[in-house]
Image (cartoon, rainbow, N blue to C red):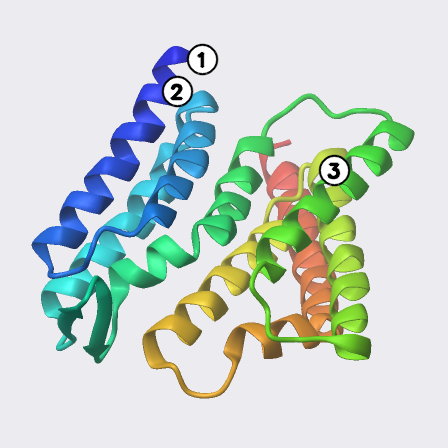
Amino acid sequence: MISGIAFGTGYAALIALLGVAFGYPVDPVVIGLAVPAFLAVRNATWWPLGAVTALVVLGEVMGSGERIVIGGVLVGTGPQWIGALVAGWPRLLVLVGVFALRGRERPSRRKALGRAAALAVIATACTALGTTLSGGLLAWALVGNVLAFGVAGFLLLRSGLLLPALLLAVGALLAGFDEQLIDVGAPAATHLLLWPAHLVLALLVAALEALARRVFRVRLA
């Protein structure tokens, strides 16, 4: 537990220092990154976190964004990679959580349904945090994403199918990055509204993954 807290805090501090090095002001929200980092080290699933971090650092090095801090407020142009990572820590938590659930002992159908429902609510809350949607659109997005994450979570917990949940988690993370980096339209909100397409894709990917596993087992037999 203590090592996980230390790693999470250290990771958040590292991103804060990288942000300062690239011209960002220190954002208190950066401490949120300690949560997915803690989960990653606790479940030995640090490599998704490392891959996303490497992509962000590479984007900053190769990018053409400019940052000016006026009165502690960031005024910049171009892609703000570290800013996107800091703002997107809840979506990063969903991605790390998917890998943390992989390989666990498969529960009974009833337990899998209950856990998948709880995890779906948490994942939807993380992906919808800060959304600009309201009213009927928000209700449509929330209910639908709980359903999509619930189905993907059940397939992961009960059948060990990773790709459907991974597809939803990566899609949510990329939508959040898209909104922060390009700042054209509202990709994150649009992504939430398109949950029927995501659900269909998740089911298709699940069928393909199950088929691939069956073929692989037959060849090994």
Percent coordinates x, y for residue 201 in the rendering: 68, 68
Q: Is residue 214 left or right of residue 40?
A: right
- Gap between marks 2 and 3 measured at Cα: 29 Å
- Asked whether residue 156 appears in the rendered view, the answer is yes
Q: Name the residue type under label 1.
A: Met
Q: Which mark is residue 1?
A: 1
Question: Which residue type carries mark 2?
Answer: Gly
**Element type at marker 3?**
helix
Which of pointers 2 and 3 lies earlier in the amino acid sequence?
2
Residue at point 30% right, 42% down? 50
Apparent side of residue 12 relative to residue 149 in the rendered image (left or right): left
- Residue 96: assigned label: none
The Cα atoms of the two marked residues, 1 and 2, are separated by 5 Å
Q: Which residue is mark 2?
A: 4
Residue tagged by mark 3? 159
Q: Nearer the viewer, mark 3 or mark 1?
A: 1
- Dot 2 falls on a residue whose secondary structure is helix
Q: Position of residue 179 (x, y in %)?
A: 43, 75
**Which residue lies at the image location 35% right of the left edge and 29% below the top edge?**
8
Give the percent coordinates (x, y) of residue 58.
17, 60
User: 91 or 50: nearer the eye?
Assistant: 91
Describe residue 92's horizontal placement relative to residue 129 as left or right: left
The image quarter containing residue 80 is bottom left
Residue 119 position by quadrant: top right
Q: Residues within 10 Å of mark 1 (few under 14, many from 20)?
A: few
Residue 102 appears in the figure? no
